[in-house]
C-alpha cells in the first residue's frame, strides 16, 4: 500500500457538470463554504447554459471538455490526475446537495483509518422525492456507518463493493495504484473502483454521519432503461459477479423492504412498485443478453444513449 495520508491531508473536490440548471447556485452556496480549504474542480461538458460561467465567477477551477468526450470513469480519472497535489479527492454530482457544513469534513475523517481506500456518505431523499424514490435512498443508505473488506464478501456479496460517486471520496494514490476508474463503462464506475480497491487490500467506509440530499423520481421507462444499463454492465464486467456474487439476492431483499415501506406509508403505490419490479427485472435480463441485440435496439433501450455512439 502507498504511504498513509498525513494527519492534515490536502483535499480536492470534483463535480462533473452539464447544464446544471436551477440547483447549481444552491450547490455552490452549500458546498463552497464547507470546501473553503479544498481545491474545487468543475469539469464541465460544454454546457449550453451558464453553468461554466457561474463556476468561474464563484472561484472554482474550471476544466471544459467536449460533451462527446465525457465518460463516467474516464472523466473522473482525468480529475484524479488533474488534482495531483491532493491526498484525498471527493466526488459530488451536480444534483447532490450536502446536508450541512460538516458533511465534507466528516467524510474526510474516514481516512484517519490508514486502511480505508474510499469512503462514501449517506444520501437522503430530496424534499420532492416520491415514496418509491425515498425508500431507495433509505434502503441503500442506512443510518449506521460501517467499514468493509474482502472478508465481508461472503456476508454482503455484491454490496461489499457498493460506492456512489454522487458523494464519495478516495485516497488518491490508493485508487490510482489499484487501477483507478475504468474507462468506457456504461455506469457504476464507482463500484468497479471500489472492487479494485478491495482486491488491492483496501477497506471501504460508509459514513452515515456525512449526508447529502440526492434522489431521482424515475419514470417507469427510465427505471427499465437504468436496469437495462446495469445488466449491460454486469455482462461486460462479469468478474464483478464472479467474485462478489449474483445481484438477484440483493434485489430480492430490496423488493421485500420496499413492499413493507410502502404498505406502511403509501399503500396506493404498491401496484406501481410491483410494475416497476417487473420492468427492472426485464430490463436487467435484456441488458445481460445485450450481445444478442442489434446496436440500434440497445441504444433505444438504454438510459445512457451516448454510450452506444
Image (tube, helix red, strand yellow):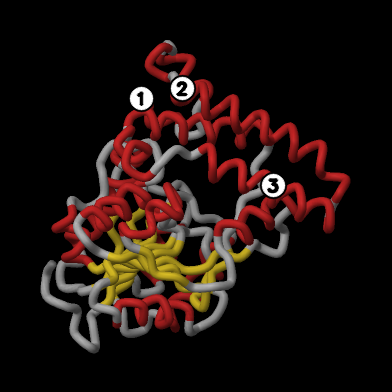
User: Which tag, 2 or 1, sits closer to the chain's start?
Assistant: 2
Element type at mark 1:
loop
Looking at the image, is 176 positioned above or below residue 224?
A: below
Q: Which residue is mark 3?
A: 256
| Label 2: how many Cα within 10 Å (few below 14, some 14–19, many 20+) | some
* Mark 2 touches mark 1? (CB < 8 Å): yes
Identify the residue shown where x is 45% and y is 54%: 156
Identify the residue shown where x is 41% and y is 41%: 245
Q: CA distance from mark 2 to mark 3?
A: 31 Å
For this orientation, the residue located farthest to the right is: 268
User: Which tag, 3 or 1, sits closer to the chain's start?
Assistant: 3
Say the numbered circle drawn on residue 309.
Answer: 1
> Left or right: where does residue 130 sit relative to residue 279?
right
Say the numbered circle drawn on residue 299.
Answer: 2
Element type at mark 3:
helix
Residue 67, horizontal then vertical, whole percent: 35, 41
Identify the residue shown where x is 32% and y is 55%: 194
Quarter the N terminus occupies: bottom left
Looking at the image, is 35 positioned above or below residue 49?
A: below
Identify the residue shown where x is 33% and y is 29%: 236
Amino acid at each position: 500500500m502507498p504511504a498513509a495520508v498525513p494527519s492534515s491531508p490536502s483535499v480536492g473536490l470534483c463535480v462533473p457538470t452539464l447544464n446544471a440548471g436551477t440547483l447549481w447556485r444552491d450547490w455552490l452556496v452549500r458546498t463552497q463554504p464547507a470546501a473553503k480549504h479544498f481545491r474545487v474542480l468543475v469539469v464541465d461538458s460544454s454546457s449550453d447554459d451558464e453553468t461554466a460561467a457561474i463556476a468561474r465567477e464563484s472561484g472554482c477551477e474550471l476544466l471544459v471538455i467536449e460533451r462527446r468526450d465525457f465518460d463516467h470513469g474516464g472523466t473522473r480519472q482525468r480529475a484524479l490526475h488533474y488534482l495531483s497535489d491532493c491526498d484525498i479527492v471527493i466526488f459530488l454530482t451536480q444534483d447532490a446537495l450536502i446536508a450541512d457544513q460538516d458533511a465534507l469534513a466528516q467524510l474526510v475523517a474516514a481516512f484517519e483509518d490508514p486502511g480505508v481506500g474510499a469512503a462514501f456518505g449517506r444520501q437522503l431523499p430530496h424534499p420532492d422525492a416520491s415514496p418509491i424514490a425515498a425508500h431507495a435512498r433509505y434502503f441503500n443508505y442506512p443510518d449506521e456507518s460501517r467499514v468493509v473488506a474482502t472478508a465481508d464478501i461472503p456476508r454482503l456479496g455484491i454490496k461489499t463493493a457498493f460506492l456512489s460517486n454522487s458523494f464519495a471520496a478516495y485516497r488518491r494514490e490508493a485508487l490510482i495504484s489499484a487501477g483507478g476508474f475504468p474507462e468506457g463503462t456504461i455506469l457504476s464506475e464507482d463500484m468497479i473502483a471500489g472492487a479494485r480497491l478491495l482486491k488491492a487490500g483496501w477497506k471501504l467506509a460508509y459514513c452515515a454521519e456525512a449526508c447529502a440530499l440526492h434522489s431521482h423520481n424515475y419514470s417507469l421507462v427510465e427505471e427499465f432503461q437504468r436496469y437495462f444499463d446495469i445488466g449491460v454492465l454486469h455482462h461486460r464486467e462479469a468478474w464483478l459477479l464472479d467474485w462478489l456474487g449474483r445481484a438477484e439476492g440483493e434485489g430480492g431483499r430490496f423488493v421485500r423492504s420496499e413492499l413493507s415501506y410502502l404498505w406502511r406509508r403509501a399503500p396506493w403505490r404498491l401496484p406501481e412498485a410491483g410494475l416497476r419490479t417487473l420492468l427492472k427485472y426485464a430490463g436487467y435480463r435484456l441488458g445481460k443478453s445485450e450481445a444478442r441485440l442489434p446496436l440500434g435496439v440497445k441504444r433505444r433501450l438504454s438510459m445512457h444513449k451516448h454510450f452506444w455512439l
